[in-house]
Image (cartoon, grey):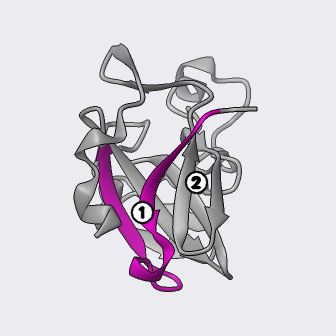
Amino acid sequence: MAALRAIAKTSNLPEGQMQLIEVDGQPLLLMRVAGEFFAVGGLCPHRSAPLIQGWLRGTVLECPWHHYCYDIRSGENLYPRNVYPADLPHLQRDLQPLRCYPVRVDADTLWLEEEGVLYGHGRESRMDASRLGDALE
């Protein structure tokens, strides 16, 4: 079983809203959609735009800079993947998925499963939620 770490109070995240937190210096975006909670990387995989400035429409998160769209349940790139020709590999490299992190809910606490590492800006680090006090207050 994966280790769990408390990252937020569910009552602090209203339906259809996003909350930005930081885990070991890496931005993590929390969302609540249709009663379910999601955690994804806080920067767009395309050009590192801050996704908190984007738009959440159901389970689709749109980047504020280039309008790339991601499914927050799977991280799949929905746009522009659906319009890029498959036979142009130089375009395909721009279609990296959004990193998704498994979360669990217990009472009023949102828990992050520490099954792996956070990736960003060419480095990796173990999850360290010691700087998440605001999300838990």
Which circle marks residue 70 in the picture? Answer: 2
In the rendered structure, the answer to whether residue 117 lies left or right of residue 136 reads right
Q: Residue at x 50, y 30 (%)?
A: 94
Query: Which span is picked out in magenta?
Result: 3-22
Number of marks: 2
Quadrant in which the C terminus is drawn: bottom left
Q: Indicate which disc, 2 or 1, sits on the residue closer to the N terminus.
A: 1
Q: Are marks 2 and 1 in contact (CB under 8 Å)?
A: no
Residue 87, image x, y percentages: 72, 24
Residue 27, image x, y percentages: 31, 44
Quadrant in which the N terminus is drawn: top right
Q: Is residue 58 above or below residue 46?
A: below
Q: Residue at x 68, y 82 (%)?
A: 34
Question: Is 95 covered by the magenta stretch?
Answer: no
For marks 2 and 1, give the one nearer the viewer.
1
- Secondary structure of the residue carrying numbered label 2: strand
Mark 1 sits on what residue? Answer: 8
Residue 108, image x, y percentages: 54, 74
Amino acid type for the residue under numbered disc 2: Tyr
